Image: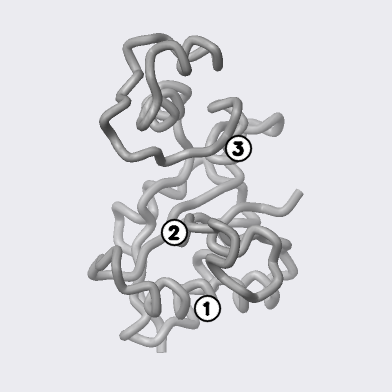
């Protein structure tokens, strides 16, 4: 009863806070084969944060947030609701490490929310075992009711600090 994180997943954990890496690795060690998951992203560059912020926003909206016009992509689906794109916990924090990871059940089916929920249950249990406080992007208020108030970031897990 364990899955093996591949070299790509492990490389995506480089630069992520060791507490969060411990949680992800513990979740993998606890995962049944049908709960296989992959690491999509760990630390993001400022440029990637700008790219994400520009999705669904005009050049004027980007400028207002200090994001260069070239990142505006008003025709794309919006992927972040942060007012400051560099406030993402995927960006390096004061300790020089990323405090967030994006995970997805593998193989990935973005419409299979039941698999995302099962994966989240596993990750949250691993965090409890490791004594690391985390938040899940589909349940920001941690009340056990995913996606109740526009909480839609099912792949996202971050340190709750």
Spot occupied by residue 131 in the image (x, y as percentages of width and height): 74, 69
Labelled disc at residue 97: 3
**C-alpha distance separating marks 1 and 2:** 13 Å
- Residue drawn at (64%, 58%), measured in percent from left and top? 140
Q: In the rendered image, which quarter is residue 21 located in?
A: bottom right
- Residue drawn at (32%, 40%), measured in percent from left and top? 77
Identify the secondary structure beneath mark 3.
loop
Residue corresponding to mark 2: 155
Would residue 78 appear left or right of 147 to someone viewing this image? Answer: left
Between 19 and 125, the one lying in front of the other is 125
| In the image, residue 106 above or below residue 40 | below
**C-alpha distance separating marks 1 and 3:** 24 Å
Between 81 and 37, the one lying in front of the other is 81
Instruction: Point out the frontmost of discs 3 and 2.
Output: 2
- Badge 3 density bin: few <14, some 14–19, many ≥20, Cα 10 Å: some
- Residue drawn at (54%, 56%), measured in percent from left and top? 150
Spot occupied by residue 16 in the image (x, y as percentages of width and height): 54, 45
- Residue drawn at (41%, 21%), measured in percent from left and top? 47
| In the image, residue 7 above or below residue 3 | above
Instruction: Point out the frontmost of discs 1 and 3.
Output: 1
| In the image, residue 84 above or below residue 36 | above
Q: Quadrant of the N terminus?
A: bottom left
Spot occupied by residue 28 in the image (x, y as percentages of width and height): 45, 73
Residue corresponding to mark 1: 122
């Amino acid at each position: 009863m364990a899955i093996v994180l591949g070299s790509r997943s492990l490389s995506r954990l480089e630069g992520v806070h060791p507490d969060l890496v411990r949680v992800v690795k513990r979740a993998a060690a606890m995962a049944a084969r049908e709960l296989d998951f992959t690491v999509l992203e760990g630390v993001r560059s400022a440029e990637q944060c700008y790219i994400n912020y520009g999705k669904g926003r005009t050049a004027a909206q980007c400028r207002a947030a200090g994001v260069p016009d070239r990142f505006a992509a008003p025709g794309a689906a919006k992927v972040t609701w942060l007012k400051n794109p560099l406030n993402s916990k995927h960006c390096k924090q004061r300790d020089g490490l990323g405090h967030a990871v994006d995970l997805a059940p593998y193989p990935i089916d973005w419409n299979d929310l039941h698999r995302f929920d099962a994966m989240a249950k596993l990750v949250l249990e691993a965090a409890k075992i490791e004594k690391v406080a985390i938040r899940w992007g589909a349940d920001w208020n941690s009340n056990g009711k995913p996606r109740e108030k526009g909480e839609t970031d099912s792949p996202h897990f971050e340190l709750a600090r």
